[in-house]
Image (spheres, rainbow, N blue to C red):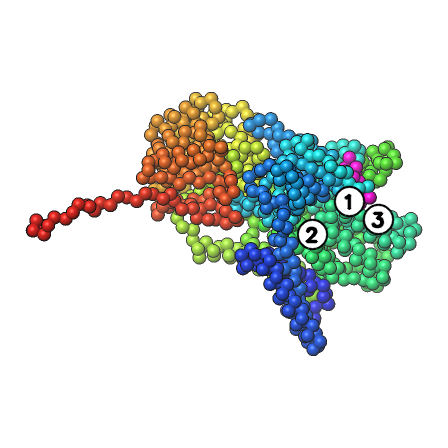
């Protein structure tokens, strides 16, 4: 059952494991155990590593090799941990970011462009105004900062976002710009990506926004001998060539050949994501491997000596790595190509797993935070599966057995080719399936999607990708020589990519092709890979090559996950009550209500501006709560900042019914028509409600429509007002109610509530004193950052119910330190409120009420005689 023979000698694999462990443990330990004091963590790690290196030397001299090996690995891990903390936590004292806050402030800087501008996908147009202008982003290495009338030295890197037409900048030019600088904000909702952690990992701690290209002045052009500048110009010229010679798929070709994904539409990227083919859109090891093999065969075809061909392949892949931006998958593949060329030139064979470990060591030592990037994880994991499949799966061919050779010789040449092709296709399918199974936990946990269609689709498009790359590179090579040949190759590349797009689009429409999922717990995903490593180390090779071994292993670990999912609710039952989460969407609204019986009601989902941010936030809130189904989805009114994220929610989550008013159905807005079309296509029932109606659901939770005015002309005034009641507590959801409709609602003397969601995002026009006095809430939640008159609004809500009943006002974002999403728990015991701050939930205390006057009389007591 277990392995008895020793493991193959792969020393770099052990070193790579130690380096990876140090990169993971270092930043986490510095944050948890040293309180964020980076210098103390770095000094401690390097001091301990020095001691262990000395102990390793003494032990090695004593010929105690096993103990020496463990000491060496521990020393490597501690040294790497200190280096990881230094790279991600230590920054110069004059970094531009230290003088900025999370609110924009004017800055003027001077520095060098280290990453040329790339176009950003513009946000969609909304009801609030015309379509927003396009924007671009570049990275500038700061050298000077203007302080008053003088310039002072500064450092650090900043991401410069320019609105409008991107400026003509290349790497290496010196620029002077004026804009509004800020620091990345922490995540405002659970499950969202931490912008601060990403900024620390890239060592780019600040953002400067310029309202036009006129805010940027080129002080000095880059030197003519700069290699990075030359490569940048070549890349831009290549993108322009593809755009000129390809029809409508130049963006896909630029992503495939040059790593430029700016020109791709968001819908195209989404189709590649859900079908499990997103790796085609980013330059990966597949592209570098195809380029290296094709170039080597071409050079050998023209009778170039083997050694020179290997040198040319290594040089070309290195230039290509620099040309496409030196992303981690490209660096990993290039290092493997270099090691293979070196081994072939020396006449030796390097173990593939050892070479992969060497590439991992170089990547992680160069940039330790790469260990946390999902692209890096998937790149190395996929390559490790390819290496393992090649080592475990026996490759028996007709030349291995005399009888098989005799049988093979009796077949016709066409049959032999077909059988060889069948074996190659079968190997491709099996290897692709192994990669899909091994990477599925990471993909499900990070992207919340599972794509079984990728098992079929990837083998189908595998021959088309190298063909499209060949035509695309020929188009780039022929462009300076012959426009006719470049156009011909471009047309061929366009037709090949059309086939890829057609297959991907077809696969995305197949029922059951993919599924949006909550994703496994972090402990289960990490445990799955530890379980895989344990099997590879403990089992002998003859068992590892059996399908039953891996099927049993998958069933066992899946059973662990299912058992934990069943046992945890029994061991820690959810207390009875109403759970409400108000997402932080900026100027928008999204409320998730979970009833005592577990039914989910979502009221509104949208924000002002781009809907992408709203759908990311709402999806993160639902997935972080373990929810994959919305039983009731309510849209209060036909205002896009309350429903422009709903179309994406319909695609990512199972929706029981849509609840709207007849006014919403009669709206002439194109966004409303598009939403209703999606609802009709997905056959989701639509319920129309009016004032006085009740939305059926949980017997322990009552949802009523308190108010709706179909006579109002403005969208805001037609908002549905909902009352959610459970365990004697009451939540009031008011939408964007304002104006005369709000006056009539207040005049109707609504009952008091425990929690009030402030109408119209806490605007002054929503009459805060009137509605607060009429409902007398203990808590007022404002879904928005608050405007210029936020202090007046806060005071009005807090004092409206009287001095003896002050309300606590909480908003879901805004200035630094105000926090993000708000979670409320309403039960018979009372109302508990928590707010999402700095990556975790923090308790929010209720408003402090003045002490009640004492009922004990202060008059002097009568004399003793009078008492009797």
Q: Earlier in the sequence, mark 1 or mark 3?
A: 1
Read off the residue under disc 1.
Answer: 228
Residue contact at pointers 1 and 3, CB within 8 angstroms:
no
Which residue does the image show at 69% across and 34% down from the upper left? 216
Mark 3 to mark 2 CA distance (whole Å) = 23 Å
- Helix, strand or loop at label 2? It is helix
Residue contact at pointers 3 and 2, CB within 8 angstroms:
no
Count of numbered marks: 3
Which residue does the image show at 77% across and 38% down from the upper left? 221
What span is in magenta?
A: 225-240
- In front: label 1 or label 3: 1
Read off the residue under disc 3.
Answer: 295
Which residue does the image show at 60% across and 29% down from the upper left? 125
Read off the residue under disc 2.
Answer: 379
**Furthest residue toward bottom:** 62
Q: How many residues crowd mark 2 within 10 Å: few (<14), some (14–19), many (20+)?
A: many
Residue contact at pointers 2 and 1, CB within 8 angstroms:
no
Quadrant in the rendering for residue 806: top left
Q: Earlier in the sequence, mark 2 or mark 1?
A: 1
Q: Residue 133, how many percent across, how many down?
A: 64, 30
Q: How many residues crowd mark 3 within 10 Å: few (<14), some (14–19), many (20+)?
A: some
Q: Residue 558, how many percent across, how many down?
A: 57, 56
Mark 1 to mark 3 CA distance (whole Å) = 23 Å
Whether the magenta-drawn stretch holds residue 226 is answered as yes
Tell me: residue 523, above or below residue 236. Answer: below
Q: How many residues crowd mark 1 within 10 Å: few (<14), some (14–19), many (20+)?
A: some
Mark 2 to mark 1 CA distance (whole Å) = 25 Å
Q: Residue 124, how many percent across, how many down?
A: 61, 32
Q: Residue 71, how many percent across, how many down?
A: 65, 69
Which residue does the image show at 31% across and 39% down from the upper left? 804
- Helix, strand or loop at label 1? It is helix
> Is there any visible trace of residue 535 in the rendered image?
no
């Amino acid at each position: 059952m277990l392995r008895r023979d020793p493991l193959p000698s792969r020393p770099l694999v052990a070193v790579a494991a130690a380096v990876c462990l140090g990169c993971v443990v270092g930043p986490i330990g510095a944050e948890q155990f040293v309180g964020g004091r980076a210098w103390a963590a770095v000094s401690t790690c390097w001091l301990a590593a020095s001691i262990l290196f000395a102990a390793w030397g003494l032990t090695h001299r004593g010929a105690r090799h096993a103990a020496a090996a463990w000491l060496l690995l521990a020393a490597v891990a501690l040294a790497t941990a200190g280096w990881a903390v230094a790279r991600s936590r230590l920054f110069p004292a004059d970094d531009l970011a230290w003088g900025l806050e999370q609110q924009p402030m004017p800055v003027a800087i001077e520095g060098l462009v280290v990453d040329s501008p790339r176009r950003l996908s513009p946000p969609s147009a909304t009801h609030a105004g015309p379509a927003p202008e396009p924007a671009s982003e570049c990275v500038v290495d700061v050298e000077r900062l203007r302080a008053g009338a003088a310039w002072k030295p500064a450092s650090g890197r900043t991401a410069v976002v320019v609105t409008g037409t991107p400026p003509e900048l290349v790497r290496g030019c010196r620029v002077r710009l004026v804009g509004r600088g800020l620091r990345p904000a922490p995540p405002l909702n659970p499950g969202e990506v931490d912008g601060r952690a990403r900024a620390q990992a890239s060592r780019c701690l600040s953002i400067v926004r310029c309202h036009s290209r006129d805010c940027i002045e080129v002080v000095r052009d880059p030197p003519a001998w700069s290699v990075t500048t030359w490569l940048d110009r070549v890349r831009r010229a290549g993108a322009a060539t593809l755009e000129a010679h390809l029809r409508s798929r130049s963006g896909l070709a630029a992503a495939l050949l040059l790593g430029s994904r700016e020109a791709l539409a968001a819908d195209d990227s989404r189709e590649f994501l859900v079908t499990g083919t997103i790796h085609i859109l980013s330059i990966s090891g597949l592209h570098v491997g195809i380029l290296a093999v094709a170039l080597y065969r071409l050079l050998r075809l023209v009778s170039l000596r083997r050694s020179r061909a290997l040198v040319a392949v290594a040089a070309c892949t290195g230039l290509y790595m620099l040309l496409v931006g030196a992303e981690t998958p490209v660096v990993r593949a290039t290092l493997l190509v270099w090691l293979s060329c070196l081994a072939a030139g020396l006449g030796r064979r390097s173990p593939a797993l050892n070479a992969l470990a060497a590439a991992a060591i170089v990547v992680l030592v160069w940039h330790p935070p790469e260990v946390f990037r999902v692209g890096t994880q998937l790149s190395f994991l996929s390559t490790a599966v390819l290496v393992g499949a090649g080592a475990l799966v026996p490759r028996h061919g007709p030349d291995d057995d005399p009888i098989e050779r005799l049988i093979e010789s009796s077949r016709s040449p066409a049959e032999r080719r077909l059988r060889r092709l069948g074996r190659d296709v079968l190997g491709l399918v099996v290897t692709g399936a192994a990669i899909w199974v091994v990477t599925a936990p990471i993909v499900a946990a990070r992207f919340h999607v599972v794509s079984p269609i990728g098992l079929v689709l990837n083998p189908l498009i595998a021959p088309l990708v190298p063909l499209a790359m060949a035509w695309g590179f020929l188009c780039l090579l022929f462009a300076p020589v012959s426009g006719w040949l470049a156009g011909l190759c471009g047309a061929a590349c366009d037709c090949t990519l059309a086939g890829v797009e057609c297959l991907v689009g077809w696969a995305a429409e197949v029922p059951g092709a993919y599924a949006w999922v909550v994703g496994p717990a972090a402990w289960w995903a990490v445990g799955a890979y530890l379980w895989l490593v344990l099997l590879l180390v403990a089992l002998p090779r003859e068992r590892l090559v059996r399908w039953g071994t891996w099927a049993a292993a998958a069933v066992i670990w899946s059973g662990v996950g299912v058992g934990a999912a069943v046992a945890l609710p029994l061991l820690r039952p959810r207390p009875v009550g109403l759970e409400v989460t108000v997402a932080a969407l900026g100027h928008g609204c999204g409320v998730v209500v979970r009833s005592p019986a577990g039914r989910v009601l979502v009221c509104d989902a949208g924000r002002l501006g781009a809907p992408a941010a709203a759908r990311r936030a709402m999806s993160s809130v639902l997935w972080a709560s373990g929810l994959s189904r919305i039983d009731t989805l309510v849209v209060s009114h036909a205002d896009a900042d309350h429903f422009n994220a709903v179309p994406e929610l319909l695609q990512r989550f199972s929706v029981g019914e849509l609840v709207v008013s007849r006014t919403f159905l009669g709206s002439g807005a194109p966004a409303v028509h598009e939403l209703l079309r999606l609802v009709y296509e997905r056959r989701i029932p639509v319920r129309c409600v009016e004032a006085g109606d009740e939305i059926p659901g949980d017997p322990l939770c009552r949802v009523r429509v308190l108010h709706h005015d179909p006579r109002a002309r403005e969208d805001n005034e037609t908002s549905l007002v909902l009352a959610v009641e459970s365990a004697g507590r009451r939540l009031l959801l008011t939408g964007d109610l304002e104006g005369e409709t709000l006056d009539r609602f207040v005049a109707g003397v609504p009952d008091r509530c425990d929690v009030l969601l402030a109408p119209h995002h806490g605007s002054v026009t929503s009459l805060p004193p009137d509605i607060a006095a009429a409902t007398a809430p203990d808590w007022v939640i404002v879904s928005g950052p608050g405007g210029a008159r936020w202090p007046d609004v806060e005071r009005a809500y807090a004092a409206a119910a009287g001095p003896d009943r002050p309300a606590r006002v909480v908003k879901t974002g805004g200035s630094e330190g105000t926090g993000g999403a708000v979670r409320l728990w309403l039960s018979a015991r009372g109302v508990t409120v928590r707010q999402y701050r700095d990556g975790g939930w923090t308790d929010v205390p209720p408003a402090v009420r003045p002490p009640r006057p004492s009922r004990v009389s202060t008059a002097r007591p009568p004399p003793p005689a009078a008492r009797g």
